[in-house]
Image: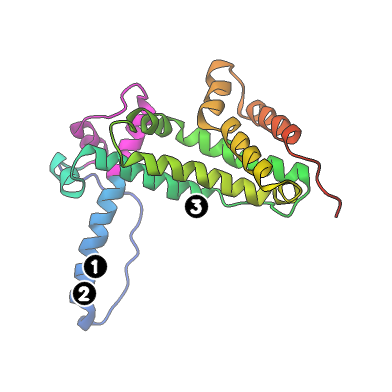
Amino acid sequence: MSKVADSRPLMTFAVPAIATRPLRIDGRRLRSERTKQLIIEAYLALLRQNPATPMPTAARIAERAGYSVRSIFERFPDLNKLRAAAADYQLAHAAALAPPRNSDGDRATRIRSQVETRAGTCERDVTLWRVLIFSSDQDADLKPRLKMARERTIERMEVMYRPELATMSERDRKYLLISLEAITDFESWARMRELYGLSFEEGCAVWIRAIDRMLPPTPLA
């Protein structure tokens, strides 16, 4: 199966002849990395298209990516490694799309900013999250990635709610952060959206109200 042409333009540079050989080697490596990325994106697209199939076949992934099945296994030893790579890709993608914003704002601004950022991550990645949870007992590579995702959520809340958390004891602060991470979990978001039919804005409003009630009073400046 031949590779599907990528419509995104490639940037080219004029370089001295002496640099031709190392650039050709780098070019092969970059093409291989690009192939890996497209395979990962194809896997994620198939998950979103059919959440009931947690592991599409290699043939379907290859067809979606525009590569051969051989190309997949040249870059990933097995489909479990592809799934783990997809988790890494989405963790990096989420971090790039959702840096902490408005961390110096007032209480209402900080809560809304945190909630909307978290809701956007859950909206995009809930299907992959369910696959990782479902598969984690059979694949030890997934557990540290799940742990990392939760820790990153807590780290973000520590930044966003620093004024309120600073008024608490270490133990109470730890328990509150665990509670906040739990109520803003992927399944919490999915339950509001899928079971109760809330819109994105309504789901955010539920989380905003809950977090505002759980946080201690904001200290006066």
Please give the count of numbered marks on the rendered protein.
Answer: 3
Indicate the secondary structure of the residue bearing disc 1: helix
Q: Are marks 2 and 1 in contact (CB under 8 Å)?
A: yes
Between residue 174 and residue 124, name the one nearer to us: 174
Q: Which residue is mark 3?
A: 96
Assign the C terminus to one quadrant of the image: bottom right
Residue drawn at the location 70% of the way across and 40% of the way down: 112
The main secondary structure of the magenta stretch is helix
Residue type highlighted by circle 2: Pro
**Callout in the foreground (1, 3):** 3
Q: Which residues are magenta?
A: 39-66
> In screen coordinates, is 85 left or right of 192?
left
User: Residue 58 placed where, x, y %?
Assistant: 20, 34
Q: Which residue is mark 2?
A: 22
Residue drawn at the location 81% of the way across and 41% of the way down: 217
* Residue 10 image-quadrant placement: bottom left
Q: Which residue is mark 1?
A: 26
Identify whether 123 is placed above or below 85: above
Residue type highlighted by circle 3: Ala
Assign the N terminus to one quadrant of the image: top left
